[in-house]
Image (cartoon, rainbow, N blue to C red):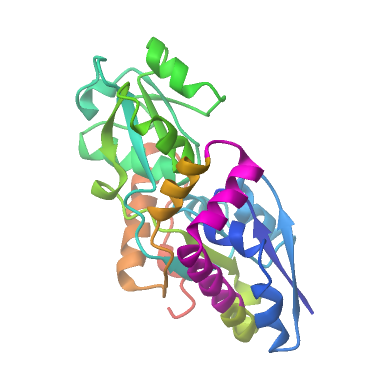
């Protein structure tokens, strides 16, 4: 049997696993083989699982919640350690936005439907504002730094090498550090039928992911060179972004379930998802 993993560059562990041999090595131990299905939009992961295109995928915190809300029967398989330095909500250093409340009535650019929605929605909620009613959320168009400089937008949630590229220019200020609002874990999940029926395959994939994480942690220069060649940008920015990640997998815990449930409740209240979600339903041990 062939196990198919969904790969997009927004999930670092899967991204690098697809460039190493570890998946086939781990699956060979149970008489299986692996393949990678590449796609660009990580928010489609739940849909691809439901369609049977992939068996297991990984994203940030938001896509599995929206997938549950859409009725997809998924199961969490593993999570990363928290990633407090993965991203941040930036504003212009000399601009009018000094606190979260100042975002009311403005436009914020973010990867809608990704973990960035979780970050912004929770930060707004804590300030008594609403993701649905208080701001206009726009998807990135590639010129976010220039739009923020000009005042065309009030905020921008940046991550990874893109964040590193503008962090030290002095033009922008971190309004919301990710680690102060959410844990921002990388989250891995599968179709329930696959996870429940093939626990040995899930364990093999998890072992391969752990090996890929260890490889990146031990080979930051090589990993950064791979990412820069593929994605563009400066090598130093990619290395700094990779060095800021924990590169460590953890089991699904009660703490994580509580984090996800809080996100689901905020999303429902803000109208980002149409119906309430019970996160525990996606926990195989429940």
Task: Determine whether 226 is above or below 150 in the image.
Answer: below
Q: Is residue 57 left or right of residue 182?
A: right
User: Which residue occupies the foreground of this view, 193 or 202?
Assistant: 202
Residue 241 spot, x, y in % from top left: 43, 47
Residue 168 makes an appearance in the image? yes
Tell me if residue 86 is in the magenta stretch.
Answer: no
Q: Quadrant of the C terminus?
A: bottom left
Tell me if residue 232 is in the magenta stretch.
Answer: yes
Residue 9 makes an appearance in the image? no
Q: How many numbered badges does the structure rendering display?
A: 0
Q: Is residue 138 left or right of residue 83?
A: right
Residue occupying image coordinates x 39% and y 48%: 86
Residue 26 found in image quarter: bottom right
User: Which residue occupies the foreground of this view, 152 or 117?
Assistant: 152
Residue 15 spot, x, y in % from top left: 60, 56
Residue occupying image coordinates x 39% and y 15%: 149
Task: Determine whether 183 is above or below 118 in the image.
Answer: below
Q: Quadrant of the N terminus?
A: bottom right
Residue occupying image coordinates x 32% and y 17%: 105
Residue 231 spot, x, y in % from top left: 62, 41
Task: Determine whether 188 is above or below 166 in the image.
Answer: below
Range of residues picked out in magenta: 205-234
The overriding secondary structure of the stretch rendered in magenta is: helix
Farthest-out residue, right? 1
């Amino acid at each position: 049997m062939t196990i198919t993993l969904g790969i997009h560059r927004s999930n670092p562990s899967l991204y690098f696993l697809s460039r190493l041999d570890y998946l086939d090595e781990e699956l060979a131990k149970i008489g299986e083989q692996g393949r990678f299905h590449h796609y660009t939009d990580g928010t489609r992961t739940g849909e691809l699982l439901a369609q049977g295109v992939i068996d297991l995928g990984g994203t940030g915190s938001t896509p599995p919640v929206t997938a549950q809300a859409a009725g997809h029967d998924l199961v969490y398989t593993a999570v990363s350690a928290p990633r407090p330095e993965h991203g941040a909500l930036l504003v212009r250093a000399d601009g009018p936005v000094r606190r979260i409340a100042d975002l009311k009535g403005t436009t914020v650019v973010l990867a809608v439907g990704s973990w960035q929605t979780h970050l912004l929605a929770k930060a707004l909620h804590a300030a008594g504002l609403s993701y649905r009613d208080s701001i206009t959320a726009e998807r990135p168009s590639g010129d976010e730094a220039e739009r923020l400089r000009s005042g065309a937008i009030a905020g921008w949630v940046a991550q990874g090498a893109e964040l590193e590229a503008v962090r030290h220019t002095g033009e922008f200020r971190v309004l919301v550090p990710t680690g102060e609002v959410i844990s921002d874990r990388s989250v891995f999940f599968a179709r329930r039928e696959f996870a429940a029926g093939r626990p040995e395959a899930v364990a093999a994939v998890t072992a391969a992911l752990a090996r890929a994480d260890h490889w990146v942690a031990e080979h930051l220069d090589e990993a950064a060179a791979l990412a820069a060649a593929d994605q563009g940008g400066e090598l130093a920015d990619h290395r700094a972004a990779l060095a800021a990640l924990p590169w460590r997998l953890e089991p699904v815990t009660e703490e994580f379930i509580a984090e996800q449930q809080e996100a689901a409740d905020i999303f429902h209240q803000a109208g980002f998802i149409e119906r309430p979600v019970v996160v525990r339903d996606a926990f195989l041990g429940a």
